[in-house]
Amino acid sequence: MALSLYDTMAREKRPFVPRDPARVTMYVCGPTVYNYAHIGNARPVVVFDVLFRLLRHLYGEDAVIYAANVTDVDDKINRKAAEEGVPIDTITERYLAIYNEDMATLGALRPTHQPRATRTMGAIKAMIERLVRNNAAYAAEGHVLFDTQAYSDYGKLSRQPMEDMIAGARVDVAPYKRHPADFVLWKPSKENEPVWESPWGPGRPGWHIECSAMIEETLGLPIDIHGGGIDLLFPHHENEMAQGMCAHGHAHGRPEAYARYWMHNGFLNMGAEKMSKSLGNVSLVHDLVKQAPGEALRWALLVGHYRAPLEWTGELIEQARKALDRLYGALRRASDVEAAPAEVPQAFLAALEDDLNTPAAFAELFALGSRLETAAPADRARAKGELLAAANLIGFLAGDPEVWFQGGADEALRARVEALIAARVEARAAKNWSEADRIRDELASLNVEVMDGPSGATWRIRDTV
């Protein structure tokens, strides 16, 4: 089966055909680095990490170029810097380092490129100049605005009526606009804000132009895949495509000259509401990774199809942990077998190639785990190899099974737990049930869960989520 992806522009799944199989390009809108990322921010990171891994598997690691930008100049960053009395790069460097560390804990590979807005100012200003020359932008009262009427397909990506786009746009109503939907490409900086010189006066760029310039400078046009959360579909991606097209003289049609496929992941919801810092209903990745394994959080983010909304709950994390317990348990019980080199099984690959159908892929992992448990001795090495090949492709089961179950326990705690379990085995053998129960309660007080099985007792540290 060949890879097919749901293209937001076409509103259907399409076979994926890169412009150049030797240079497959993907761009995903990245973080605004002014605070800790919440788990909703992590969903697109993990989703497109799976796609990045799959593309590398299909086309070769060196053939796939993945850029995820960093917005490092923004009103929120400015406010944070002013509150702390420090330059903006003090804020952005701090939170970008934390962000990268947290995403790595979730198993996300570092993108090939991580361009930053403040380091792309030359390209941003050059693109604005081209838009002005192409009569797609105009200067007014220290601002430069994109003329939405200059692009005939404006609204085609989000498929919204113009009146809805005007109401939903993140642009100020201003008398100098030619049309209410026109949006800012360059604006004057306020007092004590970062400022750059430009042909239109000192100031800083608008939000949308940053991504267009970073894409063009880092990857070139057209790119194969443009990804991000569904909340970015309008206005950000709509505006980004419009200005990117007009900067190259494509004011009429040919949207594939900018991005050949548009992909959007669904919201991560906390209860009935989208998770959002402005609503205050967030779970920070930086906190969650101290309470549960990053691998369990990654599984939870992928348990539903990426295009569907996902409700984030403690139960979801616990279910993810149990799913991984099942797979790591199969590996632990096969610890006497060395995995044979194996290709990724076709059924598992077919699930991923069907628009990243991770629920179906997870079902295949469980089938592979069951096969390992029931395989004849002569087939166990191959079964173990296939399970690891499939899981490793999407960022799972790379750790030691014993570490998985006993993660968070230092040597002293491990020694104490092992001694208690041995004492409990002796008590049970002597039918001293009260002593066995007392030891189990003591283990529970250490946040240790004991799992009795046919081959003996095993244990793990409970999650604290």
Image (tube, rainbow, N blue to C red):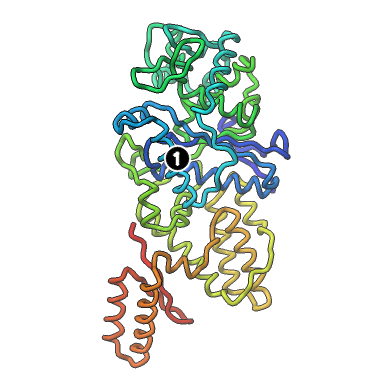
Q: Name the one closer to the observer, 398 or 313.
A: 398
Q: Residues within 10 Å of mark 1 (few under 14, many from 20)?
A: many
Q: Name the one closer to the observer, 379 or 110.
A: 110
The disc labelled 1 sits on which kind of residue? Leu
In the visual, does 91 lie left or right of 229? Answer: left
In the visual, does 112 lie left or right of 101? Answer: right
The image shows residue 416, relative to residue 87, as above or below, that is below
Residue sitting at 56 percent across and 69 percent down? 370
Residue 209 rendering spot, x and y as whole percentages: 51, 22
Residue 244 rendering spot, x and y as whole percentages: 58, 21
- Does residue 48 appear anywhere in the picture? yes
The image shows residue 423, relative to residue 231, as above or below, that is below
Residue 156 rendering spot, x and y as whole percentages: 55, 22
Residue sitting at 38 percent across and 67 percent down? 461
**Secondary element at tag 1:** helix
Residue ID for mark 1: 96
In the image, farthest residue toward the bottom: 430
Residue 328 rendering spot, x and y as whole percentages: 51, 67
Quarter of the image where the C terminus is located: bottom left
